[in-house]
Amino acid sequence: MFSQSIGKQSKKIKNNVERGAVKKFAEAIGDLHPIYVDEETGKNSRFGTNIAPPTFPRVFDYGVIEGLHLPNKGLIHGEQSFHYKRPLLVGEDIFCYSEVTGYSEKSGTQGKMGFLLLQSFGEDPSGQIIFTSKSTVIISEAVRRELISQ
């Protein structure tokens, strides 16, 4: 069902590491470290500006992978990891896209569950990768059955 999507990727979408969004995100996760929210601390840091928390890329738009139709509900956010070349700087533009890297199914007590593997990328305007992210989307038996019947 999702195996045909392996290797497909979305087009790059421009995102901005906006100061207000970084502050709201830091508040939401309960981490108000001054490097994220205090402008003076950012100016005096080795980066010369504030940086975003490591999980901030969760709020970015990664575009649409053509042919990959996931429902808006009934999915489980599984494992996710981030790898950085450098921090995200407040004010910079990041170009983001995702790729389907794998799909498998396993049988459990509730039936088959699908495991969709995605890799996401964030690049600077020159195309240099700043971060990558790997995530697993778990698709329940009920959602699988609904998608198959469509």
Image (tube, helix red, strand yellow):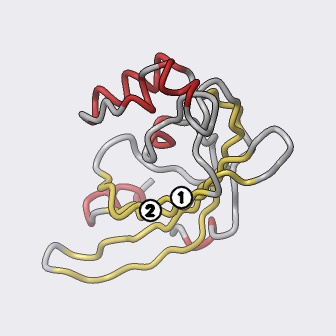
Q: Position of residue 130 (x, y in %)?
A: 67, 51
Along the horizontal axis of the image, is 110 left or right of 107?
Answer: left
For the point 49% across and 36% down, which residue is it? 52
Apparent side of residue 122 relative to residue 106 in the rendered image (left or right) = right
Outermost residue, bottom side = 107
Count of all numbered marks drawn on residues in the image: 2
Classify residue 76 by image quadrant. Answer: bottom left
Mark 1 and mark 2 residues within 8 Å of each other at the beta carbon: yes
What whole-number distance in Å separates the C-alpha atoms at marks 1 and 2? Answer: 6 Å
Identify which amino acid the numbered label 1 is placed on.
Ser
- Horizontally, residue 77 falls left or right of residue 64, namely left
Q: Residue at x 71, y 40 (%)?
A: 95
Q: Secondary structure at mark 2?
A: strand
Q: Residue at x 64, y 30 (%)?
A: 48
Residue that badge 2 annotates: 81
Circle 1 packing at 10 Å, graded few (<14), some (14-19), many (20+), is some
Which residue is nearer to you in this view: 102 or 61? 61
Residue 51, placed above or below residue 20:
below
Q: Position of residue 38 (x, y in %)?
A: 43, 21
Q: Position of residue 116 (x, y in %)?
A: 46, 67
Q: Secondary structure at mark 1?
A: strand
Of the residues under marks 1 and 2, which one precedes in the sequence?
A: 2
Q: Residues within 10 Å of mark 2 (few under 14, many from 20)?
A: few
107 or 137: nearer the viewer: 137
Query: Residue 91: which quarter of the image?
Result: top right
Query: Residue lying furthest right in this view?
Result: 126
Disc sitting over residue 133 in the figure: 1
Type of amino acid at the residue the image marks with label 2: Ser
Query: Is 147 above or below relative to 13?
Result: below
Q: Residue at the location (47% across, 16% down)? A: 20
Q: Is residue 96 above or below residue 41?
A: below
Q: Nearer the viewer, residue 97 or 85?
A: 85
